[in-house]
Amino acid sequence: MRRKLVVGNWKMYGRLARNKALLEGVVAGVGALKTADFGVCVPYPYLAQAQSLLQNSNVVWGAQNLSQHEEGAFTGAVAPGMLADFGCRFVIIGHSERRGLFHESNEIAAAKFDAALKAGLTPIFCVGETLAERESGVTEQVVATQLDAVLDRAGASGLAKAVVAYEPVWAIGTGKTASPEQAQAVHAFIRGRVAQQDSQVAQALCILYGGSVKAANAVELFAMPDIDGGLIGGASLVAEDFVAICRAAAGK
Ligand code: 13P
């Protein structure tokens, strides 16, 4: 039985004072929830703050991106080992905002995935189709290509140390959620694709759904057999909303 996982993706939101209130609210709200796992992926400057406020809690923390390089002359980039220095568990890789706005290819995402594993971080590897791709019936093809980039490079044994997030681009920040059935179909497809390489890894793989998850839709999404939790954008910025989603994952 896979444990459910809920991770907040703060994106480029946050300020010291606001973060403190938010993290304290989350810690207080999820402290008693023992049947699921929780995390937040914060902007780089706030990793130390997250570490100090979360280190004695049941909420782990991480980042939203990293460099594929170990170190070097890469102005503005952040090395995997730097994230490890601040106690990060997770790092989000291949988010559609990175792919779209920052032109990250499947190859770059796969290289980052590899670099994260080497630093002992758990990648949260995002895949998902645009609305145009869904409407032209190529969702599975798109998701397969994204997933294969990582499978080809890191193998099923690499995926065994990672989390996958299915985030349909058309559902991100739009208030439109994939229906539980739509999401389930893609989650099952992802699991099946991994199973072609290694059925044990596929069975154990944690596959999150992301895209306008709210307290109001979390219960029905998380009830689907291949949805193992959520990657939460907007609703992770409000303690009571995020906690409500965490409760849904914990079955409380
Ligand atoms: P929203 O929950 O704001 O739609 O964002 C989803 C997301 O992109 C999480 O990574």
Image (spheres, grey):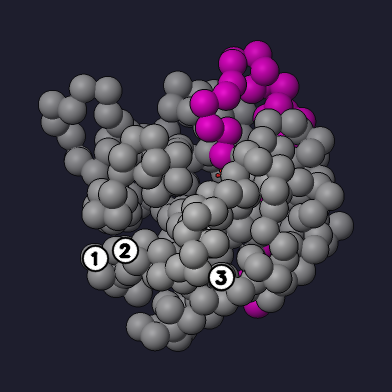
Percent x, y for residue 131? 54, 53
Question: Residue at point 37% right, 62% down?
Answer: 146
Asked whether disc 1 touches disc 2, contact meaning CB atoms under 8 Å apart, the reply is yes
What is the distance, in whole Å, between disc 2 and disc 3 at their CAs? 17 Å
* Disc with the residue nearer the chain's start (2 vs 3): 2
Above-or-below relation of 55 to 220: above
Please, is residue 203 above or below residue 7 in the view?
below
Tell me where residue 118 appears, x and y as whole percent. 27, 53
Q: Nearer the viewer, residue 218 or 26?
A: 218
In magenta, the rendered stretch is 1-26
Residue 115 position in % (x across, y down) = 26, 50
**Secondary element at image label 1:** helix
The tag on residue 58 is none
Confirm whether the magenta stretch covers residue 14.
yes
Q: Earlier in the sequence, mark 1 or mark 3?
A: 1
Q: Which residue is mark 1?
A: 153
**How many residues crowd mark 2 within 10 Å: few (<14), some (14–19), many (20+)?**
many
Quadrant position of residue 235: top right
Amino acid type of the residue that numbered disc 1 sits on in the rendered structure: Arg
Quarter of the rendering occupied by the N terminus: bottom right
Residue 42 lies, with reference to residue 107, above or below; the image says: above
Which residue lies under the disc numbered 3? 186
What is the C-alpha distance between the residues marked 1 and 3? 22 Å
Label drawn at residue 150: 2
Left or right, 58 with respect to 216, comes to left
Is residue 229 highlighted in magenta? no
